[in-house]
Image: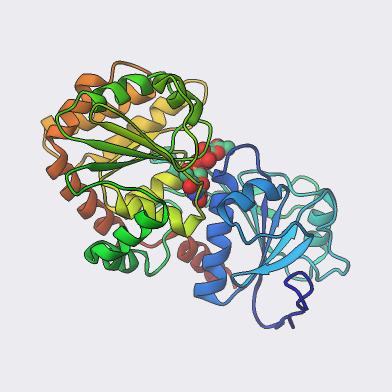
Amino acid sequence: MDAKTVQVTIDKAVPRWDIFCAVVDNFGDIGVCWRLARQLAAEYNLSVRLWVDQLAPFRALCPTLQECDQQWLEGVDVRHWQGENCTPETSDGAADVVVEGFACNLPAAYIEAMAAREQAPIWFNLEYLTAEPWADEYHSLPSIDAQTGLRKVLFVPGFSAHTGGILRERDVIERRDQWQSHSTYRSLFLKQLNVQCDHNTRLVSLFSYENSALPELLRAMEQFSQKHCVLVPMGRVVASIESYLGESLPLGQAITRGALTVQAIPFLAQAEYDHLLWSCDFNIVRGEDSLVRALWAGKPLLWHIYPQEGEHLIKLQAFLTRYTEGLTPEQAAAVMALWMAWNTQASMVEPWQQALAELPTLSRQARSWALLQSGKTDLAAKMVQFCTKLV
Ligand code: TRH
């Protein structure tokens, strides 16, 4: 029997969750839904189905994914969602809890099946993570579906106690600490990626959208007194790096200019990407999910926020206000200047140098910020608690 045809007996007593994910673009939507699905199955023993409409972006971060309609992966029943193929055949077929990822619009027939259940399902609309104050106000607000009268709850991930929290597996900090306190993990990992750099080289990971501030950042590193090695998981930013270097950047090959070495590495499976973030001295990330993973890594970071018609700078500022809370005004200003320059495509040289001057403090702050956040209830726990309160 292969992975596609494994039959599993469904225990009727175990609550069933259906998570729906329509991939708009990039990896964030499926990145979050896949992480949530795995955590619910692993930590709460729930029966979780993940419906995803595009397998290719999913496979990038989960290379064991097969091209088929149904498969079991890490305790999750993964389905290729194609039109109405998620419509349950029986009236109790709709799940007990339904998560609509990022307002992805469930098919009408599935909603009808939800309405036909004896006991109405709990229906979450999972929003994007934000540090903006509106998250406190809107999190857990219900709305009524006009067709069926079903209640849908807006679930807004965020950083304060009144929001939906952020995704965090129970043992992530422990696993990170173990990794970071044994240098052999890092050395072996880098060796596997064929990365050769000495201990005096600052290791930077770069996952970013196209950004016209990038050449300046690379130039600042090239001319800096300390050596930098920038590891770039294959993706859309590679073309900009090639244009800076004036030559192509083949996978695995390191190219050096002055104090700067750049190396393209494979796009990693999600767990491996954590290892990259844990191993680097500085992480450049984009979107919400890699931001959260970089926060758990406890290393200084720079966030390229997903651009959205002017709105993103408000969202960026809201996060910065929270993130820099423990810093002196000068240190906070250095972080803000760097992040704003990167996100407004302004000059990077000075902000980068100023941030580097504060690096030891920023490293300590990144670690204590992660520790503080890890004491809060995480997103999966908040969802489960919400459901428990209702039944
Ligand atoms: O891919 P993204 O740019 O996703 C974005 C954002 O989520 C944005 O808000 C959304 O509106 C838009 O998509 C449609 O960035 P994000 O959110 O960080 O997701 C990247 C995922 O890819 C995350 O789960 C980490 C994972 N990843 C790997 O697994 N391996 C890798 O090598 C890298 C670089 C990332």
Extreme residue toward the top, this view: 347
Front residue of 361/95: it is: 361
Residue 6: x %, y % from top left: 75, 77
- Residue at 40%, 55% (x, y): give it: 274
Quadrant in the picture for residue 186 = bottom left
Between 348 and 24, the residue placed more toward the observer is 348
**Quadrant of residue 359 within the rendered picture:** top left
Q: Which residue: 62% across, 37% down?
A: 25
The N terminus: image quadrant: bottom right
- Please state, as top left, top right, bottom left or bottom right, where the C terminus lies in the image: bottom right
**Can you see residue 159?**
no
Q: Residue at x 24, y 26 (%)?
A: 258
Q: How many marks?
A: 0
Q: How is the image coloured?
A: rainbow
Q: Which is more toward the observer, 307 or 101?
A: 307
Residue drawn at x 57%, y 68% as measured from the top left: 390
Residue 33 in the image: x percent, y percent?
58, 54
Q: Is residue 145 above or below residue 192?
A: above
Q: Residue furthest right?
A: 89
**Residue 323 visible in the snapshot:** yes
x then y, percent, for residue 247: 45, 23
Q: Is residue 387 left or right of residue 338?
A: right
Q: Name the residue nearer the viewer: 332 or 54.
A: 54
Left or right: residue 104 compared with residue 32: right
Where does residue 191 sit, x and y in percent of width and height? 36, 56
